[in-house]
Image (tube, rainbow, N blue to C red):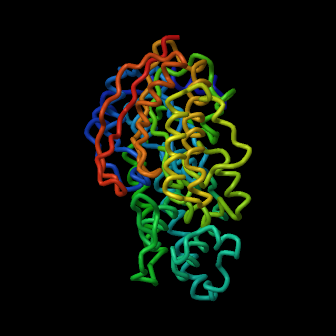
Amino acid sequence: MQLTLFKEEVVGLQARQNSTANKIMENDRAFHDWYRFVLSFPPHLVRDYIKKFRLGKMEILLDPFCGTGTTLVEAKLNNIPSIGCEANTMAFIASKTKVNWGIDAQKLITAAEKISMEAAIIEKELPINETYRLNNEQEKLILKDSIDDVPLSRSLLLRDLISKNEREELNEHLLLALAKIIVYSISNLHFGPEVGVRKSKITDHPVFFLWLNQVRSIAADIQTRCYNDTPSKVIKIDSRDISNCLEKSSISAVFTSPPYPNEKDYTRTTRLESVILGLINNRVELRCLKNNLLRSNTRNVYKMDNDEIYIKNNSRIIELADLIEKKRIELGKTSGFEKLYARVVKLYFGGMARHLAQLRIYLKPGAKLGYVVGDQASYFQVLIQTGSILEGIARELGYKVISLDLFRTRLATATKKQMREEVLVLEWPG
């Protein structure tokens, strides 16, 4: 990452800002769907804390678990330079693409029209259901019946034609549009606490038409925001190990939403589009992806993991893990996943401690941090007060705790109780 260039972009930004651009930014808050692609928290929450942290146009906002870019998009709209870190390849591409407003919108539409026309011609000439298919290893990675054969073949055809597009600078936007329609328009997926499959109702989706419309929607957004050249970088990296990716004492604020400790496999949320776009092709590649993620569920825990060493002296976490294990034994639960519940808790908070410890040298003195987290009770209904526990970890690492703000409550499906979602606000004294 060229931090010197990044700083020059920030300095040069002042000369290019004007009152007209700011007025458009303030009035235009009705984002199209592509900005809301798999969001973990609402954009207004980011805006609220940008104001609370009193960030200026010459300061850098970091999102170390940036997901699909909610924080980065809001930072850019508010003319705040930002940096995001993300290990999930599909989420990384989504984030990086969503803050890239410098492409030619009309050329994007022209490329999409050409590709969709070519796809329609090929479909007439070839039996694409036989030509464009997933192999056996790829099929094993996705949920059974998550997409029907015809839309799948058409999606794979579009993917291949996009890869051959001569204007490579447009391809990530074209692929993001394809990912969006795969999930929300042509698949059989539904989203609750976890990803599931509904019974198919329409098998012959007009994939090429839907994709072209999504590209036009993206192009329309870009046309309204092309004035905004506020720098935003996205780095593909494990957020527990961000060494050598940031400049020391360069970050003025952090706003992020890390995973919560529960049984939600976050790779499943983006699994279908990741496989169709060729980002994950077999179980080895899937394991490699999971290995770079914070350990928040039993499906990405491995024998060699050792993040628990970072909280080995934290009595509250050790007692919580022991309580979960005691509950497991009392209930006679013996599955492999259930035996890992207690270990997940230690690995999760150990990973967060590792992240917070490493982050310190990159923060400016007085830097403000906001972590959106939620309480959980998915492990034998033992309450995990995520925000409160992270508050204690942060204190031990030298952070000043400013507040633990209630963001919202949600009804837990297992306990039927209201769970707190909070924003843990910290300050790094330096």
Residue at horizontal 66%, vertical 31%?
309
Residue at horizontal 58%, vertical 38%?
346
- Up the image or down, 209 lies above or below 203; here it is above
- Up the image or down, 219 lies above or below 398; here it is below
Looking at the rendered image, the quarter that the N terminus falls into is: top right
Residue 11 point in image, percent of width and height: 51, 20
Residue 344 lies in what quarter of the image?
Answer: top right
Residue 273 lies in what quarter of the image?
Answer: bottom right
From this viewpoint, is residue 35 visible? yes
Residue at the extreme left: 27
Residue 50 point in image, percent of width and height: 36, 28
Question: Closer to the camera, 3 or 219?
Answer: 3
Question: Closer to the camera, 368 or 224?
Answer: 368
Residue 357 point in image, percent of width and height: 59, 24
**Left or right: 48 with respect to 327?**
left
From this viewpoint, is residue 101 visible? no
**Left or right: 18 with respect to 398?**
left
Residue 397 point in image, percent of width and height: 55, 19
Residue at horizontal 60%, vertical 67%?
276
- Up the image or down, 183 lies above or below 267; here it is below
Residue at the extreme front: 330
Q: How many marks?
A: 0
**Left or right: 407 with respect to 354?**
left
Question: Closer to the camera, 42 or 127?
Answer: 42
**Left or right: 36 with respect to 408?**
right
